Image (spheres, helix red, strand yellow):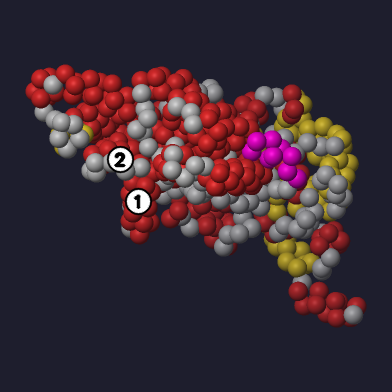
Amino acid sequence: MRRSDPRIPLLSLLLLLTAAASLLLGRYPAPGLISIGGLLRDPLAGRLVLMLRLPRILAGILLGASLAAAGTVFQMIFANPLVEPGFLGVSQGAAFGAALCIVAFSASPAVVQAVALVFALAGLALSWLLARAFRFGGWILRLVLAGIAVSALFAAGIGALKLAADPVRQLPEITFWLLGGLWSVTWRSLLFLLPPVGAGLAVVALLRWKLNVLSLDDRVAHSLGTAPERERLLLLLAATMATAAVVSVSGLVGWIGLMVPHAARRLVGTDARRALPAGMLMGALSILVCDDIARTVLPAEIPLGILTSLVGAVVFIVLMGTAGKRRGA
Amino acid sequence: MSLLELRKVWFAHPGGRSVLRNLSLEIEEGSIAAILGPNGSGKTTLLDICLGWKRPARGGVFLTGRRLDGLSRRERGTLMSLVPQRENVRFDFTVTEYVLLGRAPHLRPLEAPGRKDERIAREALAAAGIARLAQRSIATLSGGEYQLMLIARSLAQSPALLLLDEPASQLDPGNQLAVIRLLKSLRSRGITVLYTSHNPQAAAIAADAIHMLKNGSFMVSGSPREVLTSAALEKVYGVPFRVSWEGELPQVQWDEREGIRRRRGRS
């Protein structure tokens, strides 16, 4: 019986190496890797690595780990492999908040982030209240339907804001935000991320074995001495809080929260004791690699969301096309 | 003292007809009891009431002499376990990983199963006769193996009382017999068993006591010999039955030809 998996330390090592390489990778002074010697000789390069690349890399790790952890939680709690962490109104809420900020106040990135977080949480709260008001189906189904409704409402709002936005100054900014990216990350935004992300991920990590129990039918989970609704709610809130915080900084970064949990289960098995940490590491790795490409390949930054969707979709297609390894079968 | 007792239980679905009416039941410790009745007679609801998943509108449920709603969730989970009629496990656990979930009520809130729990899970797999499947993915199991795995998960819960909802109704005869033999072996290990069935023969060959349910209350309760009469069975199921005994083993069969003949005569 394996409680841990040898591939998890391996993934950690890989993440560490990738993070170190990402520090040296960029377009200054020339596109590609900068040598350690070059870094020490050039004070501007040193400041660039310390003040821009390092917080951006750390934020990327938090983003990938949060999206993958939240995706794992959502898929197991809803016993549905097709849900992703933003669907309870969180992603569209954050996007609406950001667009509103850009159009109404032409605000700085820090203000946009704060307002996006407020609206992400408002999206969750609204989904919650609607689910309580709905008179149809079980609790989980009501929550899913409410999430769809709230996301659609915010999407309509975003459409209206895009229409109203100044096409030269504001519309590109909104579009760029909607496509996601980590270009705006500073040490300050990283500090702003840490408390909600840290708290959310800690709750999820501590309860990861329980996720297995909570993926069973309500009646069976009840017979196993759990309070399925209450414990699912706790995990849901924790995962959503982390997601809302990272999304408010990064914008909409698709596919990681949906695809990485599947890939992690394929790699280390279903038991969330292994699938959750493996997923978090793989999510962080995916974001780091995509972000390295986003900021290095072209002179202008490629939006991160485009790359994660592209890579995610390709990996997903390959994953679904190859038969899973059935252990012991 | 009876292990499980229902006293004058009433239950109705919200806004619907009453499902259980003034129903009382006592399950003796160390016995195998069957709830027998046609589809829709309230068997699953009755199990849900025993489990504390549904609450009776009136009446009380007592487990080891204590009120069920006075027990903590974990206490309840260590005393009583459920094998549902169907369980769709949507993720591809291994059999061992799934059976380990039965240890949940024995663990502290943030605790994950350890070596002792793994040993108990292995014992449960062996007791259910499926030790060889331990590392298999549950998506590869046959219907019979799957049912035995559900029972193994319940055994890993180390319960005093095992509730099973139609444990054999979807299995072929060979696997039905395997499940029934497993239930009998559990009784000899001191586990009390309560199961539902719509099939009189399945109730007849395993149970010490049969409670025949019709329209939400018990029509007859007693030993198989007392309960399984062709008159009582016909009253509950609405078709003629033939019952014969060979020593302690009954043979209960509904008389299809006679049933069809009577239906024709009526129309």
* Residue A292 is a magenta residue: no
Q: Is residue A134 magenta?
A: yes
Q: Residue at x 23, y 24 (%)?
A: A49
Q: Quadrant of residue A110?
A: top left
* Residue beneath the point at 37% across and 52% down: A313
Q: Residues within 10 Å of mark 2 (few under 14, many from 20)?
A: some
Residue A220 occupies quadrant: top right
Q: Which mark is residue B240?
A: none
Q: Are marks 2 and 1 in contact (CB under 8 Å)?
A: no
Nearer to the camera, B55 or A184: A184
Say which residue appears at 58% left-offset and 59% top-offset. Answer: B171
Q: Is residue A246 or residue B146 the one in the foreground?
A: A246
Q: Chain of mark 2?
A: A
Q: Nearer the viewer, residue A246 or B129?
A: A246
Instruction: Tell me the amino acid under the disc marked 2.
Output: Glu
Inspect the image, locate mark 1, and give the three-letter code of the amino acid beneath it. Leu
Instruction: Return the residue at label 1.
Output: A310
Q: Where's the N terminus of chain A, which quadrant?
A: top left
Residue A301's mark?
2
Q: Main secondary structure of the magenta part?
A: helix
**Image height check: is B30 above or below A80?**
above
Q: Is residue B41 above or below residue B189?
A: below
Residue A170 visible in the picture: yes
Callout 2: SS = loop
Q: Which residues are magenta?
A: A126-135
Which chain does the numbered disc 1 sit on? A
Residue A220 position (above or below residue B263):
above
Task: Give the mark nearest the N terminus, 2 or 1.
Answer: 2
The percent position of residue B111, horizontal first and vertical second, equals 48, 24
